[in-house]
Image (cartoon, rainbow, N blue to C red):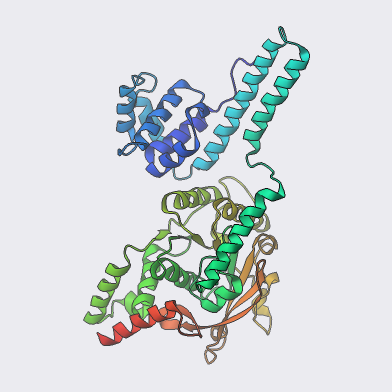
Amino acid sequence: MLATQPHCVLTEQLALACMIEDNRFASEGVSTLNAEHFYLSGHRAIFEAIKAIVGSSWDVGIVSVHNELEKAKKHREAPIEYLSQLAQMYSGAVSLKDCIKTLENKMLAREVVNTANHHIEMATNEEVVDILEQVRSDYDGIRKKACGKETNPLSFFLGKSVASIVERHNNNKRGQTVRGVPTGFKIFDQKLGGLSPSNLIICAARPGMGKTALIINMLENIGIIDQTPVGFFSLEMSSLEIMERLLSSQTGIALSSIRSGEVSDQGIKLLKKTVKNIQESPVFIDDSGTHTMSSLATKCYQLKTLNNVKAIFIDYLQLIDSPQGKQESPYEKTSQISRKLKCLAKDLNIPIVCLSQLSRSVEQRTDKTPFLSDLRDSGSIEQDADSVFFIFRKGYYDPYDNKSKLIIAKNRHGEQGEVEVFFEKSLCKFQETQKGDKWNTANQKNHQRLNKV
């Protein structure tokens, strides 16, 4: 028998530190873990205290946890000095999801040890056939816990599939022809099928083509005009720059004027009115600038759990960091990230749209139109993505040619093709050439409002 059962004190401490210092982590932790995940009795007591606080109207913190421990008469197992020590261990680099995986693994390992010890005791008194049956039953139970989702027969999935088809049929009758989250670009949505759940969608272009501009336009259409919760991770642009672009697009005031402050008094009034109208929109922005896949995944789970976002945008793939101390080639790094992004989209069951750079090989050709082979650093992006589309503005190379298009180069669930768009440079804004849809109508109203003031 093992003298000490499998456990990791540091992981237990880090998980508790996350929950004590951040109420969002506390909610995620108590919904996923239970006291049995913690080996040390003091840690189990702290977790039970956090769980009780989450179920009440109080915020989780050192004081509230200490008070809850006193109430349960367990404060000697985890004195306030130890709670302070745990809080100091908290860091934004800590991934609660990774901690949870380790805690689950250690708990199951302890269960294996305890089950084996029980079988050893049985061996002295029971019939061998009975022991073997008990062993099979016990380890089957542990295996199910460890493997998670079970394999199911065809009949299990057919019912869900038919229900989904019927729902889409009814939506079509109501004029809702897009399966996924509409981006506000009507023709593009019809070709792509919208942003479909569990899909990884790559938007790629050379620098200066307007990748960030297009994503902000989609954020505006989804989160502000359509009021659908949406998340945006900006690893390149600050929140101030994002807001300037958003307000320029919403008001019709030139971005250069907003940045320089050369806005009329009427324009200032319009800006203030616009802020008042859109400030409650469900758009959630993270501009922290540095993320590994672990920290990014943790925040994505938070957005899904706490804000029920229906889509997440990331700007951009090549800026996601490798884990600290890990040396990887650009090819290896990009391959790992694209695969993890696809798994994350599948786990969350929401679309993830990630921007990506293109290689310089585009610039060496006479025809600058991008191809899938131009995806920078790794062919695995094309493999992992459900859809890939490019932004191509001829005006970038020829100032007298203002034609722009979105090129759907890969679409696992629909058609490929091109969609003509117009790029309004003064507003950093893309719009489809087709008029009359609700998003274009909303934007036209903004411009009419500007003309009146």
Camera-side residue of 416 and 376:
416
**Residue farthest right in this picture:** 129
**Residue farthest left in this picture:** 265
Quadrant placement of the C terminus: bottom left
Q: Is residue 24 visible?
A: yes
Q: Is residue 186 above or below residue 134?
A: below
Q: Is residue 77 above or below residue 53?
A: above
Which residue is found at the position 40% from the left and 67% from the top? 242
Q: Is residue 288 above or below residue 8?
A: below
Residue 132 x, y percent position in the rendering: 75, 19
Q: Is residue 199 visible?
A: no
Camera-side residue of 301 and 436:
436
Residue 96 x, y percent position in the rendering: 49, 41
Which residue is found at the position 50% from the left and 60% from the top? 312
Which residue is found at the position 43% from the left and 80% from the top? 440
Quarter of the image for residue 221 reads: bottom left
Quarter of the image for residue 4 reads: top right
Quadrant placement of the N terminus: top right
Residue 169 shown left or right of residue 450 in the figure: right
Residue 380 x, y percent position in the rendering: 69, 60
Residue 60 shown left or right of residue 319 in the figure: left
Quarter of the image for residue 46 reads: top left
Residue 279 x, y percent position in the rendering: 31, 64
Q: Is residue 398 above or below residue 323?
A: below
